[in-house]
């Protein structure tokens, strides 16, 4: 859309929507089917996972894992991208498992390392869970 900015050396996936004035710093990586809200700013070297929605006017200074909605200051997990996942054909069971995994990671009383270990060992290793685990394991800036 109008006046978006993609800085140098960015990798932008397929079917990404960037609303007005959305800005990517250098070396940002955006997964497929992401929506970046109007006025959102993505810090250099940040990675945004596939099927993620970043709310308008917010800033991402750390990596944002796949399938979620990020909003708030500082940017935080506010839920899974249910509508986007429905539109892309993810089943009710797939969405429920994604939601359960992220509740364990972001909302449980475990620290994030323990939560990730639980997701790896106790959850069905569907493609979506593998995508989540691989993204978190490969993060160099930390997860929101």
Image (cartoon, rainbow, N blue to C red):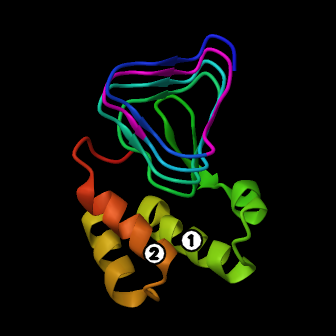
User: Does residue 91 appear to the left or right of 8 in the view shown?
Assistant: right
Residue at x 56%, y 58% (from the top left corner): 67
Q: Can the viewer see residue 109 in this picture? A: no
Q: Say above or below: 2 vs 49.
A: above
Q: Can the viewer see residue 94 in this picture? A: yes
Q: Determine whether the residue tagged by mark 2 lies in a helix, strand or loop.
A: helix
User: Does residue 12 appear to the left or right of 45 in the view shown?
Assistant: right
For the C terminus, the image quarter is top left
Q: Is there a contact, CB below 8 Å, between mark 2 and mark 1?
A: yes
Q: Which disc is residue 57 wearing?
A: none
Write down the residue under mark 1: 98
| Magenta part of the chain | 15-29
Q: Say above or below: 82 vs 114.
A: above
Residue 123 in magenta stretch:
no
Write down the residue under mark 2: 129
Q: Determine whether the residue tagged by mark 1 lies in a helix, strand or loop.
A: helix
């Amino acid at each position: 859309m109008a006046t978006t900015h993609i800085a140098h050396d960015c990798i932008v996936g397929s079917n990404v929507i960037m609303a007005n004035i959305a800005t990517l710093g250098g070396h940002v990586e955006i997964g497929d089917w992401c929506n970046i809200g109007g006025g959102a700013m993505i810090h250099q070297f940040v990675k945004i996972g596939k099927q993620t929605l970043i709310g308008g006017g917010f800033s991402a200074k750390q990596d944002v894992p796949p399938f979620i909605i990020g909003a708030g200051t500082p940017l935080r997990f506010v839920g899974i991208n249910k509508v986007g996942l429905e539109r892309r054909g993810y089943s009710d069971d797939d969405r429920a498992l994604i939601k359960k995994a992220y509740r364990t990671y972001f909302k449980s009383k475990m620290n994030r390392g323990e939560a990730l270990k639980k997701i790896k060992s106790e959850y069905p290793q569907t493609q979506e869970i593998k995508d989540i685990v691989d993204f978190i394991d490969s993060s160099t800036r930390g997860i929101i």
